[in-house]
Image (cartoon, rainbow, N blue to C red):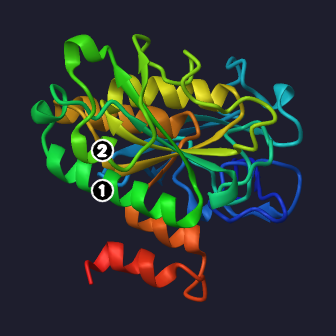
Amino acid sequence: ARQGHPTLHRKRGHPAGCRHNITDEQPLSMEAFDDRSVWMRGHRHGFRGRSEVYLASRSPGNPETASSLSGASVACRLHSPRPTCGCGAIGDTGKERDVRTRPESTLLAVIDLQERLVPVIPGGEEIVARTVRLAQAAELLGVRQSLTEQYPKGLGSSLPVIAACLPAAEEKTAFSAAGCGCLAVEPGSGIESVVLAGIETHVCILQTALDLVAKGVTVFVAVDAVGSRFAIDHEVGLRRMEQAGVVLTTSESLLFEWCQGAEHARFREVRSLITGK
């Protein structure tokens, strides 16, 4: 470390950029860091989060000093999204989780793609098309599926193209599909992960995702199959979910992940959903 600076340490087995690297093992040079801050790559849309590094030697009155830390004399206060770092931990808890989605233990939940909602969503037709593709692939690969409708008396039924490829819709008035019992993700269901598609990103998708995360379910959101009326709501909704530990992905990526390889018996059929051939 430079003169006057404490030493940052890297935990064995974690990537060099992992935020869990403040520990007693393997000294890490300060040369890779600015004196006060580390800029971390944030959301795919260009959002950049800031991690302010407070040096105990410069902040003797700060409660986050070396005396309150285990081994390291640096306190990191993060202001960035909280996706997993690849080491298998969620946030700062160290809890191991599986960040892969597998057909046999996944539920595809399609949220509120209804007659009076979809027309007011920018890119609504593409969202519907991506969702239909997910549902078709789920049917081929044995992924369980669920469909919800928000107050259909006022907002209309599911679009016919959606209703044709998914189970009968569960009606709800709560914004969270997980908080009202519409999604069968209780212990013993065999569901370990849920893929979310539908609308709106910052309301029903967000609240459903947060409730599922609270239940210990790994949540994936197909970002090209969700949307909101306004771009700012969509963007902030995605950021908030990512901060909560939700995995952001795309519909095409999910299809390939469910197959795992070209040797899968249904791969050609799934590939045709992507290429249209």
Residue beneath the point at 33% across and 33% down? 201
Mark 2 residue type: Ile
Q: Please indicate, yes or no, whether residue 235 appears anywhere in the rendered image.
A: yes
Mark 1: secondary structure = helix
Badge 2 marks a residue whose secondary structure is helix
| Vertical comparison of 270 with 154: above or below | below
| Front-most of residues 268 and 193 | 268
Residue 64 location, x and y as percent?
Answer: 72, 24
Residue 80 seen in the current view:
no
Determine the CA span between mark 2 and mark 1.
Answer: 11 Å
Q: Position of residue 6 (x, y in %)?
A: 75, 47
Q: Quadrant of the N terminus?
A: bottom right
Horizontal arrangement in the rendering, residue 174 relative to residue 115 (left or right) = right
Q: Who's the residue at 80% across and 43% down the image?
A: 94
> Which numbered disc, 2 or 1, marks the residue that appears first in the sequence?
1
Q: Nearer the viewer, mark 2 or mark 1?
A: 2
Q: Residue furthest bottom?
A: 263
Pick the residue in front: 206 or 95: 206
At 55% from the left and 87% from the top, the residue drawn is 262
User: What is the crowding at mark 1: few (fewer than 14 residues within 10 Å), some, or many (at least 20)?
Assistant: many
Residue 135 at x, y percent in the picture: 42, 54
Figure check: 3 above or below 177:
below
Q: Position of residue 3 (x, y in %)?
A: 70, 54
Where 143 sits versus 183, above or below? below
Choose between 89 and 127: the one closer to the eye: 127
Q: Are marks 2 and 1 in contact (CB under 8 Å)?
A: no
Tell me which amino acid carries mark 1: Arg
Res 162 label: 2
The answer to whether 207 is drawn above or below residue 45 in the figure is above
| Residue tagged 1 | 130
In this orientation, which residue lies closer to the viewer: 253 or 71? 253
